[in-house]
Image (cartoon, rainbow, N blue to C red):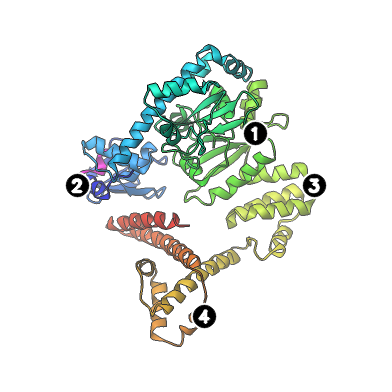
Amino acid sequence: MGIARNSIEDLKKRTKISDFILSTTTGKLRGAKGMALCPFHGEKTASMSFTDVENLFHCFGCKMGGDVFKYIQEINNLEFQDAVEFVADNYGFKLSYTDTGQNEDFKKYQAKMNIISDYFKETMESKVSIKALDYLESRGFDSTDIKKYNISFIDSDIEKFQKYCKKNEINNQDLKRLGFMSSNGNFLFKNRILFPILNIRTEIVAFGGRALDDFGPKYLNSSESLLYKKNKNLYFTTDFISSVKKRGYVFLVEGYFDVLALNKLGYSNVASPSGTALTTQQLDVISRYTKKILLCFDNDEAGLAATERVLELRNQLGTKLEINCLNLPQNYKDLSELFENNPKSFKELLKDNYELVEFLIDKSLSVNNDKQRIFEYFQKLSQHLSPLEVDVSLDLLSKKINTSKDILKRELNFQSKNQIDIDKTSVESKYTNAHLVFQDIVTADIVKSNFSFNEQVTEILNLSDEFKKSINELEKDGDKDNQYKNISYTYEQYSESISRLYLHYANLKIDTLIEEFESSKNKDFSLLQSVEDIKKKIEIYQSTL
């Protein structure tokens, strides 16, 4: 379900960005334009400009900018649609949706989920939950914790549960759409302690279940549903967002009990991918609340692999993240075990954290003293580092293995031509070559189509005068285009080349427009509008990759 585009545009015409900026920070409005203290970074002198004419804002300090909806998203940590609805509520504006029926479905199934949740809570409060209560007590959680964190229970009497559902007009199709039944019609949860998985509005959208017997996997999540997307939702408690705002960072841990353990220790700013592999979508959700992440995955090979994966995933986001790792003592397999055995040690552990790459290097050193093996591991990590990060990390590695940085640099270049080169020039060269490969494929297609441009190619040419000039020269000189006639490529390769080339030139264009805006005396806010238009297109092209 989405909000109709024309409805968003009509709302935007009725809003004034100054209404929201001046209610959330200190500033002055002169006519339709103003300056304010930027709420997204600490400052004493106003550096954020805004205008009611285009409904745009831009900070010359931290470079944050966008339209009125972007401002609401950032200041309140909301999804785009939630931000639009927030603005509409402030003006009493009635939005139109693209699929009203689907909107009603969400509301209807959310209500059904709440009814089912009530049953699980009642079951936890009944006599059948004795074994569950004993288990939770053994893990350090009492009746107060159970209520506070909405931990519930489902026993093995599925027939009783189905009667309850029938009484409340919830049929098997509803249960399947809510993620409680498998594709072959079996109910997923039997004799399990249940942890509620929430959305950002703290509504229950799914459950994670911990088995109390040997039937099935130890941990099991709801299936994907109308309300729950496994690659996007995280497990956290109701105080998560407020705690993140207060502390300014997020703990990212593996399991349900790790989340609850940190909550018991006074840290509600903790989330977990619910026992599944972390995804870029989940990392993106976290990045909307803070750019600082403190990892503490399990003390085993899987936990180390998950930590390495974070290094890879962070580069797929369009935002810079500061990621450190807690150095959990080897005698504890995870945070929950530390909580159960030595909770007072956590404050000291919190001080013992390291930057992500240093943490991974130290882990490698703790199990291997062979310099060549350690360097090969670093080489693997370096594929996910920027040139500057590689250089800084080489300084670190040089000290740790007592080998000169120059030797490590030469070794890094020598090992493989496919590895990232720490020399800045060669890194830029590799990047340029990659972009030229995509450009050659697109150019070949333009030549083969006798220089007739589709909409996507036109968009790319409009971003780059240089690329447009090269195409014009090819069209004028028939001999030059012969080199492109023999280039072969698949449809998939062409589609990827279009997307990659647009992203390449779009980012260059954005930098140019912002620089032009910042250097001009009379601020032309239409330049910022162009930036926002390009950013929206970037999202579309990124979604195709």
The magenta stretch spans residue 18: yes
Would you say 180 lies left or right of 451 here? right
SS majority, magenta: helix
Residue at 58% over, 16% down: 133
Residue 31 - label? 2
Q: Amino acid at mark 1?
A: Asp
Are dots 4 and 3 in contact, CB under 8 Å?
A: no
On the image, the x and y values in percent for residue 522 come to 27, 57
- Above or below, 269 against 450 in this view is above
Q: Please tell me which of labels 2 and 1 falls first in the chain.
A: 2
Residue 486 - label? 4
Indicate the quadrant where residue 503 lies: bottom left
On the image, the x and y values in percent for residue 188 come to 53, 31
Residue 352 - label? 1
Q: CA distance from mark 4 to mark 3?
A: 52 Å
Q: Amino acid at mark 4?
A: Asn
Residue at 67% over, 44% down: 360
Q: CA distance from mark 1 to mark 3?
A: 23 Å
